[in-house]
Image (tube, helix red, strand yellow):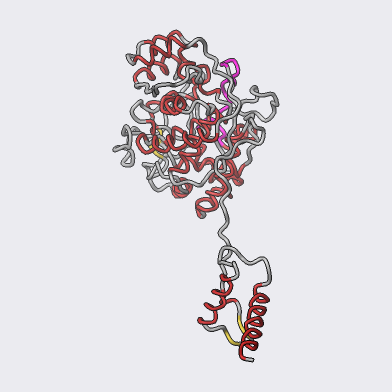
Amino acid sequence: MQLLPLQPQSFSWSPPPSASTATAPMASLTGAATASRLLPSASRARLSLSSSAGRSPASPLSSLRCLRGSSPLASRLFLSQRRPSMHLLAAQYSGAASPKCAASDPEQLKGAREEIKELLKTKFCHPLLVRLGWHDAGTYNKNIEEWPKRGGANGSLRFEIELKHAANAGLVNALKLIEPIKEKYPSVTYADLFQLAGATAIEEAGGPKIPMKYGRVDVSKPEECPEEGRLPDAGPPSPANHLREVFYRMGLNDKEIVALSGAHTLGRSRPERSGWGKPETKYTKDGPGAPGGQSWTVQWLKFDNSYFKDIKERKDEDLLVLPTDGVLFEDPSFKVYAEKYAEDQEAFFKDYAEAHAKLSNLGAKFDPPEGIVIDGPAKAAPEKFVAATYSSGKRELSDAMKQKIRAEYEGFGGSPDKPLQSNYFLNIIIVIAALALLSSLVVN
């Protein structure tokens, strides 16, 4: 499975403030996206922080407050906001560190998920939220045991130092979108919120249900962020070798690389930010969100297996194919899975769901250790009582007899959903015998 390839030197996936859908789930971003470019672009986007009366002053500090404390430029940016709540937050802010959160509250996780669903309906930011979760988890290094040095899903992406990594350009917009949700549900860690947002975006776009667990612990200070360079590029000299180098380091295999690549069915690329794609196509000229860019698929907000079909056929010049996309049908090992997913969407969904869940857990420290599951296992449908399966000798029971047997069955406490604990037919024989005896006594 794969964090979709990103090219730090020439790939910029920064969505405009008005349309966060401009980014693909994983895309490489231009190294020119320096702090001076990133933060001013954030100032053009209106920050919307929810303010609720009676909110505890001890609620966790926001990611954007982290920005204020760690950069003079960011401080001027946020202090210049006209909203009174921003002045209050700035006055309360005392450093870049976030309070230490152990586990998330299950009920707040459920509430946050509903808020994310509503956000997706209005902002069409599915690709951006997927990318947010993947980039937080995709820094994991299986060769490092110590947490949080090993990277992974630990919420470190909320800090400015990591946001300034070239591959993360534009993700400040994702933080601004989910910050009101974090403010409303302070007992959800950032690490959990990032992964919850990505999984919910996949599901709401028509993708498979992701078997997620929560309870990820947040890092508490920017010094705990991973170094730059752990995320993949989009146009390396040897795409197959590069993908394996990056994803094998995370502990992922070829099947998972290809399955995760399928998430490029969501999103689009803008050449003015990334150096890849067309300024506009017939599929992106009307949005949703800000128009423009080039998508991988025709319906770039719908999760299905069209990514693999379109790459295989390459019949539409308006659809994007990056070097790390095309190699999926060129490398012998990758091709086995790419061909399979192009033909079988059900197989793709199954493998993708497993790969996404695995990615979301990489490097995470859970409290409790087993994690928190907010969706119980689906209950299997009880086996129905089918009288037609019973017969008398070579003759099939009549419909009337089937109904009679069913009625007697239910009369003894059985039902289609609750089979009797004792022998069903023995009970019937006993009743018939008892009735016969009673009848005989009455007659005599």
- Which residue occupies 50% across, 40% down? 325
Count of numbered circles on the image: 0
Residue 19 image point, x, y percent: 35, 31
**Quarter holding residue 222:** top right
Between 100 and 173, which is closer to the camera in this rendering? 100
Q: Is residue 177 visible?
A: yes
- Which residue occupies 54% across, 82% down? 401
User: Is 266 colored magenta in this rendering?
Assistant: no
Position of the C terminus, as image quadrant, is: bottom right
Q: Say above or below: 311 vs 105.
A: below
Q: Is residue 236 visible?
A: no
Residue 169 image point, x, y percent: 45, 23
Position of the N terminus, as image quadrant, is: top right
Q: Say above or below: 237 vs 314.
A: above
Residue 249 image point, x, y percent: 65, 32
Residue 154 image point, x, y percent: 58, 26
Q: Say above or below: 420 vs 255.
A: below
- Magenta extent: 221-239
Q: Say above or below: 444 vs 169.
A: below
Between 399 and 8, which is closer to the camera in this rendering? 399
